[in-house]
Image (cartoon, rainbow, N blue to C red):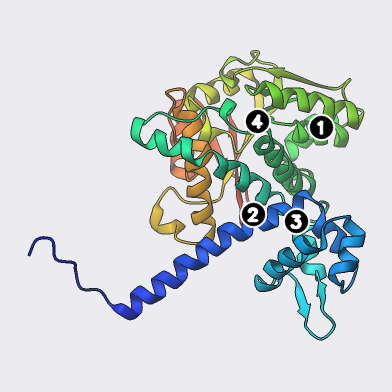
Amino acid sequence: MANERPRIDMERAKTVAQNVIGDVASMVHGAMSFIGDRLGIFKAMAGAGPLTIDALAAKTGLSPRYLREWLGAMAAAQYVDYDPAAETYLLTPEFAAVLADDDSPFFIGSYFQMAQAAVSVAPKVAEAFRSGTGVTQAEYPASFFEAAERNSLTRYKHKLLRKWLPAMPHVVEKLNAGGTAADVGCGGGRAAIMIAEAYPKARLTGFDIHAESIERARRNAEGAGVADRVAFAVANGAELPEGRFDLVTTFDVVHDAIDPVALMRGVRRALKPDGSYLVQEVNVSGDVKDNIRTLGKMIYSVSTLYCMTTSLSHGGAGIGAAMGEPKARELAAAAGFSRFTRLPIKDDFAVLYELRP
């Protein structure tokens, strides 16, 4: 009969159900981890050795009853080591490096903040599935952009100055000599600020269409003591000043641009004749079959919940985060760049291209 259910492999279905329950568990456990990050519980446990619930409550000023349940979740997820005899909980140095230490190259605790903020707009994204439009940046909570800044800060601290820029020695030479650079889609301005701190003679400008991020970037520059050498402006990357910069950077920007070709053309016009454009994108393929792994699972999800939908909300290209190198080359050619080089940098998450006019 037409409505008869198809036969299924019962054992395989059981395994599938268990796997899906695992994903649900990860989703709600992510909320627990968000709380641990937000309330500083991970930080309180880092380096403290085994702690009882009451000891952790004393360190944090938080409710012992809530901490008991939270620690149960952490122990079940094996984020903390539980000693049933002593009734203590331990955050090992390895987990502390990932969850509690903002200065660690492995720190990703802020991803829980980003995930929580992104999931909060899922009902609006669901409606966009029907309309084919999108969700604008204005509809996201401020915590999403704060989390994005925290996420990028870890990469900038350990990669931007140590690995990424040194892969272009001619650019480093110009910055040392007092060159000019711009970061387009700068968010909270951390990349521009770090470059200014590393190259005291250089002059930096950050551009972003998100006014709240620009205000935060200005405060960050004041706090870092470089506001005299780093300026920030609310501006579309397609409308940059012409022929001004030795270096222009975009970090995770092209794939969610409203008009990526116009953006890249604007960058090309803004470069000096011998300038360089550093493009950083996510190190995934443009082909689904190559992305069937944990990173692909995360990237397609974040892309749907933010990158693609914010572009489509303005009638944009909606390329999405899984852009891949072939698409990057296509966009660069359409924008008029004559040279495209994939920089020889090994990175599980990021891929970098240098484009020249």
User: 229 or 58: which is nearer to us?
Assistant: 58
Residue 143 locus on image (x, y percent): 69, 37
In the image, which disc is placed on residue 301?
A: none
The residue at the point 60 percent across, 23 percent down is 267
User: Which structural element holds mark 1?
Assistant: helix
Q: Earlier in the sequence, mark 2 or mark 3?
A: 2
Q: Residue at x 46, y 22 (%)?
A: 314
The amino acid at mark 1 is Ile
Residue marked by disc 4: 276
**Picture coordinates of residue 198, whole percent (x, y):** 86, 37
- Which type of secondary structure does the marked residue at label 2 adopt? helix
Q: Which residue is mark 2?
A: 31
Which residue position is annotated with label 1?
A: 193
Please, is residue 173 above or below residue 357 in the view? below
Residue 185 picture quarter: top right
Give the alpha-carbon distance from disc 2 to disc 3, as whole Å: 9 Å
Q: Between label 1 and label 3, give the one nearer the viewer.
A: 3
Q: Earlier in the sequence, mark 1 or mark 2?
A: 2
Give the Cα separation between the discs numbered 1 and 2: 32 Å
Is residue 180 rendered to the left or right of residue 23? right
Q: Which mark is first along the chain, 2 or 4?
A: 2
**Pointer 3: what residue?**
36
Q: Which of 95/268 is in front?
A: 95
Q: Is residue 51 above or below residue 145?
A: below
Does label 4 or label 1 sit earlier along the sequence? 1
Work out how far the residue at label 4 is from the one at label 1, CA to CA, in angstroms. Answer: 19 Å
Marks 4 & 2, CB-CB < 8 Å contact? no
Image location (x, y in percent) of residue 291: 46, 57
The answer to whether marks 2 and 3 mark residues whose Cβ atoms lie closer than 8 Å is: no
Q: Residues within 10 Å of mark 3 (few under 14, many from 20)?
A: many
CA–CA distance in space, label 4 to label 3: 41 Å
Q: Is 26 displayed left or right of 232 in the figure? A: left
